[in-house]
């Protein structure tokens, strides 16, 4: 998959990852990784007596999956500096072993930073089940490096980029 350059990224663009079925192995490995063995996750008999009626997968596994699935769904051509924030992340409904999930991405906005060397892209991420039910969603922002001198191509040297500039 070829990555998108700054000038190819537009608000409203949408991307979708392939599906991924959540397994017992995923569940066990995540419990081991984070050390959370609460009975709602680890004890089938306990979980049967809850409103869900079965063990829940960790909600934070969904967030981790969303971060990984986004790389499948879209790529940037410019070097990534790093993730700079998640906002309004919501856990809407539980995930269970056997659910097949995918990630839906929508570009919200982009802007060049004041130094004209970097840019920020904000995206809505929706982790959804195979039947379309949104399990989790929120906004993620990432900072990327523009190619040398590219910032000047978007803003003439005698004009500073306006605050929150989009091109």
Image (cartoon, rainbow, N blue to C red):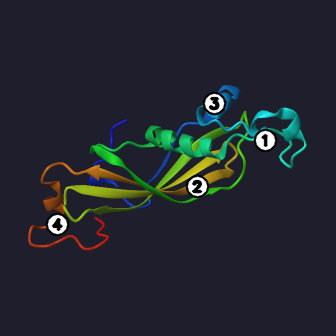
Specify few, some or many for label 3: CA neighbours under 10 Å numbering under 14, 14-19, or 20 or more: few
| Residues at marks 1 and 3 touching, judged by CB atoms closer than 8 Å | no
Give the CA distance from mark 2 to mark 3: 25 Å
Picture quarter containing residue 42?
top right
Quadrant of the frame with the C terminus:
bottom left
Above or below for 41 versus 5: above
Q: Which residue is mark 1?
A: 40
Give the CA distance from mark 1 to mark 4: 54 Å
The percent position of residue 73, horizontal first and vertical second, equals 46, 41
The percent position of residue 18, horizontal first and vertical second, equals 54, 37
The percent position of residue 123, horizontal first and vertical second, equals 45, 56
Give the CA distance from mark 4 to mark 3: 50 Å
Above or below for 96 versus 143: above
Give the CA distance from mark 4 to mark 2: 34 Å
| Residues at marks 4 and 3 touching, judged by CB atoms closer than 8 Å | no
13 or 155, nearer to the observer: 155
Picture quarter containing residue 21?
top right
Q: Which residue is mark 4?
A: 155
Specify which label sits upstream in the sequence, 4 or 2: 2
The residue drawn where x is 61% and y is 41% is: 61
Q: Which residue is mark 3?
A: 32
Specify which label sits upstream in the sequence, 1 or 4: 1
Q: Which residue is mark 2?
A: 137
Q: Secondary structure at mark 1?
A: helix
Specify which label sits upstream in the sequence, 1 or 3: 3
Specify which label sits upstream in the sequence, 2 or 3: 3
């Amino acid at each position: 998959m070829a990555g998108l350059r700054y000038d190819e990224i537009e608000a409203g663009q949408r991307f979708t990852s392939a599906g991924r079925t959540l397994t017992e192995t995923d569940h066990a490995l995540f419990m081991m990784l984070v050390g959370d063995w609460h009975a709602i996750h680890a004890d089938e008999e306990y979980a049967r007596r809850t409103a869900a009626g079965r063990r829940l997968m960790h909600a934070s596994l969904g967030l981790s999956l969303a971060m990984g699935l986004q790389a499948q769904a879209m790529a940037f051509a410019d070097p990534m500096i790093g993730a700079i924030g998640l906002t309004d992340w919501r856990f809407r409904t539980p995930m269970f072993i056997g659910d097949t999930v995918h990630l839906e991405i929508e570009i919200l906005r982009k802007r060049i930073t004041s130094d004209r060397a970097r840019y920020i892209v904000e995206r809505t991420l929706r982790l959804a089940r195979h039947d379309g039910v949104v399990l989790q969603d929120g906004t993620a922002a990432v900072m990327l490096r523009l190619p040398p001198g590219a910032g000047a191509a978007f803003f003439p040297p005698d004009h500073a980029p306006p605050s929150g500039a989009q091109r």
